[in-house]
Amino acid sequence: MNLSSLNPKLTSLPRISYGSRVRPARDWVVLVVSTIVLLAGLAVFATWEYLEGAKADPILNLPTTSNTISPEALKETEALFAERAAEAQRFQSEYQFVDPSL
C-alpha cells in the first residue's frame, strides 16, 4: 500500500485548532460548566416526567368507595382459608415425598 498518495488527501482535511496557545484552564471550565448544565437539564426533565406520570396515574383518579365488606366476599374468603388449612394438614399427614438423594 502506498501511503505517500494518502498523505496529501489527509492534509487537505479541515483541522480543529486551539490557536497559538493551549489553555487547559479554559478547557476545564468549559467541561465543568457544560456538565453542570447537562445535569441540571436532566434533573429538570426527570422532575417534569415524574410529575406528568403522577398526573396520569390511574390509581389517583379512582372514585372513593365505602369501606363496607359484602358478606358473600367474607364467606368466600373464609372458605378459601379453610381449604388452604386443610391442604396444609394433608401435606403434613397424607402426602409422602421421596428424597431422590437417598
Image (cartoon, rainbow, N blue to C red):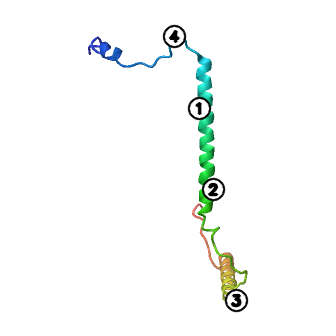
Q: Nearer the viewer, residue 51 or 75?
A: 51
Amino acid at the residue labelled 4? Ser
- The residue labelled by disc 4 is 20
Asked whether disc 1 touches disc 2, contact meaning CB atoms under 8 Å apart, the reply is no
Which numbered marker is on residue 51? 2
Q: CA distance from mark 2 to mark 3?
A: 40 Å
Considering only vertical position in the picture, is 64 above or below 31? below
Who comes first in sequence, dot 2 or dot 3? 2
Amino acid at the residue labelled 3? Pro
Q: Identify the residue at image location x=62%, y=74%.
A: 96
Who comes first in sequence, dot 1 or dot 2? 1
Who comes first in sequence, dot 1 or dot 4? 4
Label 1 sits on a secondary structure element that is helix
Q: Is residue 102 left or right of residue 5?
A: right
Q: Identify the residue at image location x=60%, y=41%.
A: 41
Who comes first in sequence, dot 4 or dot 2? 4
| Residue 56 image point, x, y percent | 59, 63
Q: Residues within 10 Å of mark 2 (few under 14, many from 20)?
A: few
| Residue 69 image point, x, y percent | 71, 84
Q: CA distance from mark 1 to mark 4?
A: 24 Å
Which numbered marker is on residue 34? 1
Who comes first in sequence, dot 3 or dot 4? 4
Find residue 93 and report its image quarter.
bottom right
Label 2 sits on a secondary structure element that is helix
| Residue 99 image point, x, y percent | 60, 65
Asked whether disc 3 touches disc 4, contact meaning CB atoms under 8 Å apart, the reply is no
Q: CA distance from mark 4 to mark 2?
A: 50 Å
- The residue labelled by disc 3 is 71
